[in-house]
Image (cartoon, helix red, strand yellow):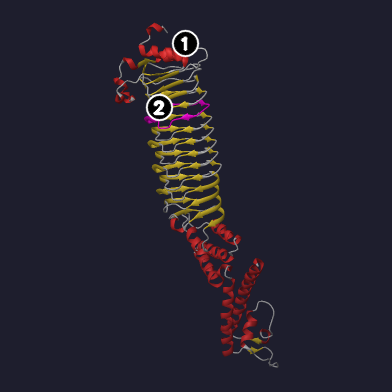
C-alpha cells in the first residue's frame, strides 16, 4: 500500500500502529457518535478496510520494545475487511466502529480480537483460530455470525450482543471450540437460530438474561454440546422457539431457573440423552409452553422441577422416560397440563405431592427406591390409577415392594390386593366372576383373616342347622353324645378329627350342607394357614 494515498484518519492509525496506541475518531457531537448514525459520519471518520488489512498483514513494522496493535474507535470502515487464511500476530481492537461490509476472517490465525459496541452486517470467522479472546461485547451483527469450526483459546464474550438474521442462522457455531468461558448474557439477543451442535466449551456457558427468538423453529440448537463446567440459562432467559440439547454433556450443573420457553404444540425443551454430572434446575418460575423431554437423560444428582409451570395439553407435558437420576423433585407450581411420562425411569428418590399430580401419568417400568412424602396405600393407588395406559402390573409390584422395604407390610398387601382387583376389570366375564368370589371370600389371599371370619360364620351356621336337625348315628348300637358345635367344627377342620364326624351321617339336604362345610373348611383353612405363615415369616 502507498502510504502517500492515506487519508488523515488513516494516517493517524498508521502512525499509531507500531506503538499499539489507540486512535479515537469520535467527534464532538456525542449524539452522532452512536454507530446507528454511522451513515452520517464525514470523511474525517472513514477508514478503508484495506488499510486495516495491510497493517494486520505486516505492512508496517512495530517499534522496538513496543507491542504493535490496531486500536481504533469511532470509525466507519468501508470496503471488505478480508483476512481469509491470513496469519495475524497482532491484536485487533475496534470500538464503536461501523462496517459497510461483513468482515471475512475464515481460516485465519489471529491474535486476540475485540469488536466492542460495533455494528456489522455480518461476521464470517469459520475455521478461524484466535490465540486469545474473541470479544464482541455490546455489538450488533446483522446477517449472521459464523464461528463454525473456529477455535478460541481464551474467552468468547458476546455479552449484550444483538444478532439478527430472521429465518436464518443468527449464530452458526457448529463444532466451535472455546477453551475458556462463553458469555451470551446481559441482554444478549438473537433473532434467528443460535446453533452450537458439537461445540466444546472448556469453562462455563452462560446465557443468563439472554433472549432468543426463532418462532416455529429452534431458538437454540445445541445437540452434542460438551461443556466442562456449568450451563446457565436463567436470570430471565427466554426462548421463543425450541431449545435442543439432545445428547449434550454438562460437567457441572444446568440451570433453567426462572426461564421461559415457548414452542406451542411441539417439543419446547429437548434434553433427550443429556448427561449432567451434578444437578439440573428447572425450577422457581421455569415455565414452558410445549413438551419438556429428558428421555434417556442421565443426571448424577437432582432434577429439580419445584415451582415449574408445564403446559402441553394435547400431549406429553413432561417426559422422563428412561431417565436415570439420583433424585427427582417433581413439585411444580401447579399440576402439569398434559401427560407426565415416567415410564422405565430409574430414580433413587422421587419427591412429589398429591396437590400437583397431573391428570395423566405413564408409570409402566418406573423404578424407584423411595417415595417422598410418605403416603398411605390408598393415596398412592390414586396416583397409580392416573396411568393413561390402564392396568399394568409392574407399577403395583414396584409400589408394594417399596412399602415392604419400609416395613409397611399392610400397605404392601393393600397395593397387591388393588392390583388383583384392577386386573379383574380387564378380564372376561367368567374370570371376573371367579375373581369376585376370591375377593369376597379371602381378598385374593391378601386378606387371609377374612377367611377366619367366614369360618366363624360357617361354624355358627352349622351349629344352628345341626342343633335343629341332628344327623343319624352311623352305628345304631353305639350311642355317642352329639354336640352340634363340635360336629360342625369337625366338618370344617381340614385335618384331624374331634370324633364327631365319623359317628354321624346326615341325609338329604343336610348331607349337602355337611359336604359344603367340608369343602369350605378345606379352602378357607388353607388360606388362613398361608396367611399366618406369611405373617410369622415377616416377624
Residue located at (41% from left, 46% from top) = 287
Which quadrant of the structure image shows residue 534?
Answer: bottom right
Crowding at mark 2 (Cα within 10 Å: few <14, some 14-19, many 20+): many
Residue 158, magenta (yes or no) = yes
Q: Which residue is mark 2?
A: 144
Comes first in the chain, label 2 or label 1: 1
- Circle 1: element type: loop
Q: Nearer the viewer, mark 2 or mark 1?
A: 1
* Camera sees residue 260: yes
Above or below, 151 relative to 235: above
**Disc ID at residue 187:** none
Q: Is residue 222 left or right of residue 406?
A: left
The image shows residue 155 at horizontal and vertical percentages of 50, 29
Above or below, 339 relative to 482: above
The image shows residue 285 at horizontal and vertical percentages of 42, 47
Which region shows up in magenta?
144-167
* Camera sees residue 321: no
Which quadrant of the structure image shows residue 527?
Answer: bottom right
Identify which residue, 362 or 439, lies in the foreground. 362
The image shows residue 512 at horizontal and vertical percentages of 58, 81
In which quadrant will I find the C terminus?
A: bottom right
Identify which residue, 408 or 343, lies in the foreground. 408
Above or below, 265 relative to 9: below
Q: Which residue is mark 1?
A: 60
The residues tagged by marks 2 and 1 sit, at their Cα atoms, a distance apart of 32 Å
Residue 39, magenta (yes or no) = no
In which quadrant will I find the N terminus?
A: top left
Crowding at mark 1 (Cα within 10 Å: few <14, some 14-19, many 20+): some
Identify which residue, 116 or 212, lies in the foreground. 116
Residue located at (40% from left, 40% from top) = 238
- Asked if labels 1 and 2 touch by Cβ distance under 8 angstroms, the answer is no
The image shows residue 37 at horizontal and vertical percentages of 30, 24
Amino acid at each position: 500500500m502507498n502510504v502517500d494515498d492515506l487519508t488523515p484518519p488513516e494516517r493517524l492509525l498508521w502512525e499509531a500502529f507500531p506503538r499499539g496506541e489507540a486512535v479515537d475518531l469520535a467527534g464532538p457531537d456525542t449524539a452522532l457518535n452512536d454507530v446507528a448514525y454511522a451513515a452520517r459520519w464525514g470523511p474525517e471518520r472513514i477508514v478503508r478496510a484495506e488499510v486495516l488489512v495491510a497493517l494486520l498483514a505486516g505492512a508496517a513494522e512495530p517499534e522496538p520494545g513496543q507491542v504493535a496493535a490496531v486500536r481504533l474507535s469511532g470509525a466507519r470502515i468501508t470496503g471488505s475487511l478480508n483476512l481469509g487464511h491470513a496469519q495475524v500476530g497482532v491484536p485487533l481492537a475496534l470500538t464503536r466502529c461501523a462496517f459497510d461490509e461483513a468482515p471475512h476472517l475464515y481460516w485465519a490465525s489471529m491474535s486476540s480480537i475485540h469488536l466492542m459496541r460495533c455494528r456489522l452486517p455480518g461476521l464470517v470467522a469459520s475455521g478461524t483460530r484466535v490465540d486469545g479472546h474473541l470479544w464482541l461485547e455490546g455489538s450488533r451483527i446483522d446477517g449472521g455470525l459464523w464461528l463454525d469450526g473456529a477455535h478460541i483459546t481464551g474467552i468468547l464474550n458476546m455479552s449484550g450482543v444483538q444478532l439478527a438474521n430472521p429465518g436464518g442462522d443468527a449464530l452458526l457455531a457448529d463444532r466451535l471450540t472455546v477453551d475458556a468461558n462463553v458469555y451470551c448474557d446481559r441482554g444478549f439477543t438473537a433473532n434467528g437460530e443460535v446453533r452450537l451442535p458439537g461445540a466444546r466449551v472448556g469453562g462455563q456457558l452462560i446465557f443468563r438474561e439472554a433472549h432468543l427468538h426463532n418462532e416455529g423453529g429452534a431458538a437454540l440448537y445445541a445437540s452434542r454440546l460438551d461443556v466442562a463446567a456449568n450451563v446457565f440459562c436463567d436470570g430471565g432467559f427466554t426462548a421463543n422457539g425450541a431449545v435442543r440439547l439432545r445428547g449434550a454433556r454438562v460437567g457441572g450443573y444446568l440451570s433453567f431457573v426462572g426461564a421461559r420457553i415457548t414452542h406451542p404444540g411441539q417439543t419446547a425443551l429437548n434434553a433427550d440423552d443429556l448427561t449432567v454430572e451434578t444437578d439440573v434446575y428447572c425450577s422457581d418460575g421455569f415455565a414452558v409452553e410445549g413438551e419438556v423431554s429428558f428421555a434417556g437423560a442421565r443426571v448424577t444428582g437432582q432434577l429439580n422441577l419445584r415451582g415449574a409451570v408445564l403446559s402441553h395439553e394435547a400431549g406429553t407435558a413432561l417426559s422422563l422416560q428412561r431417565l436415570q437420576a439420583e433424585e427427582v423433585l417433581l413439585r411444580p407450581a401447579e399440576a402439569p397440563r398434559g401427560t407426565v411420562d415416567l415410564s422405565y425411569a430409574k430414580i433413587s428418590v422421587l419427591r412429589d405431592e398429591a396437590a400437583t399430580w397431573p391428570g395423566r401419568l405413564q408409570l409402566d417400568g418406573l423404578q424407584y427406591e423411595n417415595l417422598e412424602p410418605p403416603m398411605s396405600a390408598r393415596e398412592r393407588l390414586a396416583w397409580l390409577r392416573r396411568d393413561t395406559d390402564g392396568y399394568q402390573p409392574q407399577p403395583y409390584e414396584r409400589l408394594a415392594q417399596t412399602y415392604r422395604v419400609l416395613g409397611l407390610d399392610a400397605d404392601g398387601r393393600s397395593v397387591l390386593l388393588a392390583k388383583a382387583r384392577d386386573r379383574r376389570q380387564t378380564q372376561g366375564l367368567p374370570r371376573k366372576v371367579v375373581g369376585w368370589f376370591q375377593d369376597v371370600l379371602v381378598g385374593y389371599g391378601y386378606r387371609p383373616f377374612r377367611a377366619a371370619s367366614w369360618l366363624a360364620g360357617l361354624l355358627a351356621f352349622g351349629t344352628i342347622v345341626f342343633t335343629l336337625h341332628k344327623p343319624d348315628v352311623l352305628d345304631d348300637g353305639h350311642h355317642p353324645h352329639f354336640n352340634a358345635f363340635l360336629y360342625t367344627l369337625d366338618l370344617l377342620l381340614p385335618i384331624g378329627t374331634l370324633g364327631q364326624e365319623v359317628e354321624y351321617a346326615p341325609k338329604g339336604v343336610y348331607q349337602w350342607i355337611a359336604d359344603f362345610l367340608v369343602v369350605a373348611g378345606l379352602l378357607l383353612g388353607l388360606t388362613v394357614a398361608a396367611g399366618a405363615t406369611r405373617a410369622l415369616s415377616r416377624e
